[in-house]
Amino acid sequence: MKSSHLITLLLVISSSQVWAYGSDSSTKACVKPKFSHFQPVNNSEVATNSTFTFIASPQTNPETLEVTVKGQPVELTITEKNKNFYVSGTLPASISHDFVRINIAAESPSKCRGADGWLLKVN
């Protein structure tokens, strides 16, 4: 009799552990947007009011793309090509003789947030 109780207990414990983890097919992975091909390259010296470009991955919702420089939002031109998004903008004219970071943030269609950026020296 004791062995049947032990077997029942083991079956209950093992089946509850399986349910605790859920099914892999029911959960979706969070894929963040990625950014690359920064131009001008990191730590470059540029003139005031210079143009910059980068590529956002296909996992990017272009409507959520935000770029700021020294806290100032930058107006963007976004072009889709080969499933990527080619993004360009211009540094604010008010920034000169300073180091700046171009900050990028965006969400994927599944609402995962990605961020990146790079540094430039503005003459």
Image: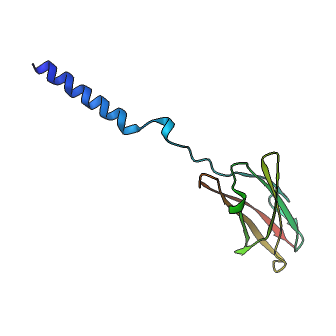
Q: Quadrant of the N terminus?
A: top left
Image location (x, y in percent) of residue 33? 67, 52
Where is residue 13? Give x, y as percent.
26, 31
From the top left corner, tell me how far across and down residue 79 is, in percent.
Answer: 83, 56
- In the current view of this chain or complex, which residue is farthest to the left? 1
What residue is shown at x 73% (from left), y 48% (from top)? 58
Going by the image, does 123 lie left or right of 119? right
40 left or right of 16 in image: right
Q: Is residue 59 left or right of residue 86?
A: left
Q: Residue furthest bottom?
A: 94
Q: Is residue 2 above or below residue 28?
A: above
Residue 70 appears in view? no
Quadrant housing residue 122: bottom right
Q: Above or below — where is 26 with respect to 49?
A: above
When asked about the image quadrant of residue 65, the answer is: bottom right
**Figure coloring:** rainbow
> Which x, y percent locates residue 101?
74, 67
Q: In this rendering, does residue 4 appear at all?
A: yes
Query: Residue at the spot x=36%, y=32% of the render?
Result: 18
| Residue at left offset 67%, top offset 59% | 106
Q: Which corner quadrant holds the C terminus? A: bottom right
How many tags in the picture? Answer: 0
